[in-house]
Amino acid sequence: MTNTVDTAKVEQMLAEGAQVVEVLPSAEYEEEHLPGALSIPLSEMTRDGVGGLDPDRPVVVYCFDFQ
């Protein structure tokens, strides 16, 4: 299930234990990323690529839009 949420909802989800995934390319993730965020580049967003995520916890997927 996919939902778009506002900042307040993200903060609530994080306080309740949600996982944060940044889908930036690896080089951009290395330059700057959210504290505690996992790096799973969008090109690696496959069933195998997300295998390390806890399926019992919500996931917040984040990508900074440079445009």
Image: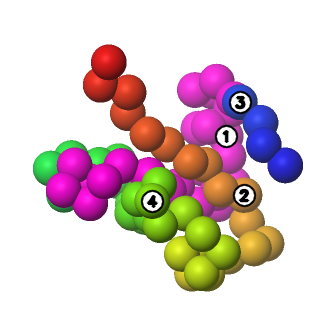
Instruction: Estimate the x, y position of residue 62 in percent, counting from the top left.
Output: 49, 43
Pointer 1 residue = 12
Q: Is residue 37 left or right of residue 25?
A: right
Q: Secondary structure at mark 3?
A: loop
Q: Which residues are magenta?
A: 5-29
Report how far apart the C-alphas of labels 3 and 2 lie in the structure: 13 Å
**Amino acid type of the residue tagged 2 in the rendering:** Pro
Q: Residue at x 77, y 36 (%)?
A: 3
Seen in the picture, residue 18 relative to 46 is either above or below; the reply is above
Pointer 4 residue = 43
Q: Are the residues flagged by discs 2 and 1 in contact, CB closer than 8 Å?
A: no
Question: Does residue 42 show up magenta in the picture?
Answer: no
Given this view, does label 3 or label 2 mark the residue nearer the observer? 3
Q: Residue at x 36, y 49 (%)?
A: 24
**Amino acid type of the residue tagged 3 in the rendering:** Thr
Q: Earlier in the sequence, mark 4 or mark 2?
A: 4
Q: Earlier in the sequence, mark 3 or mark 2?
A: 3
Q: Earlier in the sequence, mark 1 or mark 3?
A: 3
Q: Earlier in the sequence, mark 4 or mark 3?
A: 3
Given this view, does label 4 or label 2 mark the residue nearer the observer? 4
Pointer 3 residue = 4
Other residues around mark 2 within 10 Å, as few (<14) / some (14–19) / many (≥20): some
